[in-house]
Image (cartoon, rainbow, N blue to C red):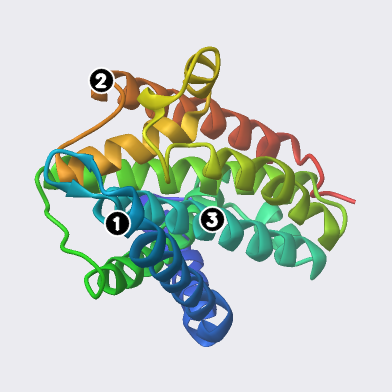
Amino acid sequence: MNAEGTLIALGTIVRREVTRILRIWIQTLLPPAITMTLYFVIFGSLIGRRIGEMAPGVSYIEYIAPGLIMMSVIQNSYGNITSSFFGAKFQRFVEEMLVSPMPGWTILAGYVGGAVLRGLMVGVIVLGLSLFFTKIHLYHPLVTLSTFLLAAVIFALLGFINAIYASKFDDIAIIPTFILTPLTYLGGVFYNVAQLPSPWKEISHLNPILYMVNAFRYGLLGISDIDLGWAYVVMLGFVVVFGAICLNLLHRGVGLRS
């Protein structure tokens, strides 16, 4: 397939994903908006008043806002690609893509692109909602945007792997329930990891979500609990590793060819 045909194929997959997201917006965009609003009301407005400042001039609700935005981006990027690609497997039209001259990276990029766009939509919605509860500063726009993109890509790739190995709909809920949700809550969204006692402080640094949340917080608030350079090393490393795994699984047809 030539370059023009590859771009057309890539654009078609992304357009299909975006159309799907917007067609069922009550399932894809509305629930995270409601959930995050409750987080802001309960943890930010009610509990936050008792906690006070997390850093000089930074209230608790300001501190958790970047983490809540990142949490919604991670969950929706992951959830979009698992449900969409597993649906393609279940309806058997993924086999048509595999036998076409379309390269494997195009299929992967198309589905990841759709997941990232859903993460962006939800992230913008949650960011808009946060402005009703607190003020948001954009100290480092490039850090904010790059962290968002890297985090969304990482969990889109992880969701793709989950969808490939899933044999039934129940399988796509295992990782979000038992791995993704605990790691998110323990990723420094609601607390400063520097305040944890040993050995929990050291153990927390093994959580990759901690680096994403703090890099995103640095972009919006200019403060972070971890070194920004290490955050990018961790995120780029996961992109490379998960991307290679996804392309290898696609090339071998694992879980895709009956």
Residue identifier under label 3: 75
Identified by mark 1, the residue type is Ile
| Of the image marks 1 and 3, the number of the one nearer the N terminus | 1
**Quadrant of the image occupied by residue 173:** bottom right
Q: Where does the image place residue 204, in percent across and percent down from the top left?
A: 51, 24
Residue identifier under label 1: 61
Tell me the CA gap for discs 1 and 3.
21 Å
Q: Is residue 77 left or right of residue 116?
A: right
Tell me the CA gap for discs 2 and 3.
24 Å
Residue nearest the viewer, comparing 219 with 120: 219
Residue nearest the viewer, comparing 9 with 163: 163
Residue identifier under label 2: 229
Report the residue at 26% width, 70% height from top: 133
Report the residue at 73% width, 67% height from top: 87
Q: Secondary structure at mark 1?
A: helix
Q: Above or below — where is 181 with respect to 211? A: below
Could you tell me if the residues under marks 2 and 3 are in contact, i.e. CB atoms within 8 Å? no
Report the residue at 45% width, 59% height from top: 72
Q: Where does the image place residue 102, in percent across and percent down from the top left?
A: 56, 52
Identified by mark 3, the residue type is Gln
Q: Where does the image place residue 97, in percent across and percent down from the top left?
A: 65, 59
Tell me the CA gap for discs 1 and 2.
26 Å
Residue nearest the viewer, comparing 74 with 90: 74
Q: Residues within 10 Å of mark 3 (few under 14, many from 20)?
A: many
Q: Residues within 10 Å of mark 1 (few under 14, many from 20)?
A: many
| Of the image marks 2 and 3, the number of the one nearer the N terminus | 3
| Of the image marks 1 and 2, the number of the one nearer the N terminus | 1
Identified by mark 2, the residue type is Gly
Q: Secondary structure at mark 3?
A: helix
Q: Above or below — where is 48 with respect to 208? A: below
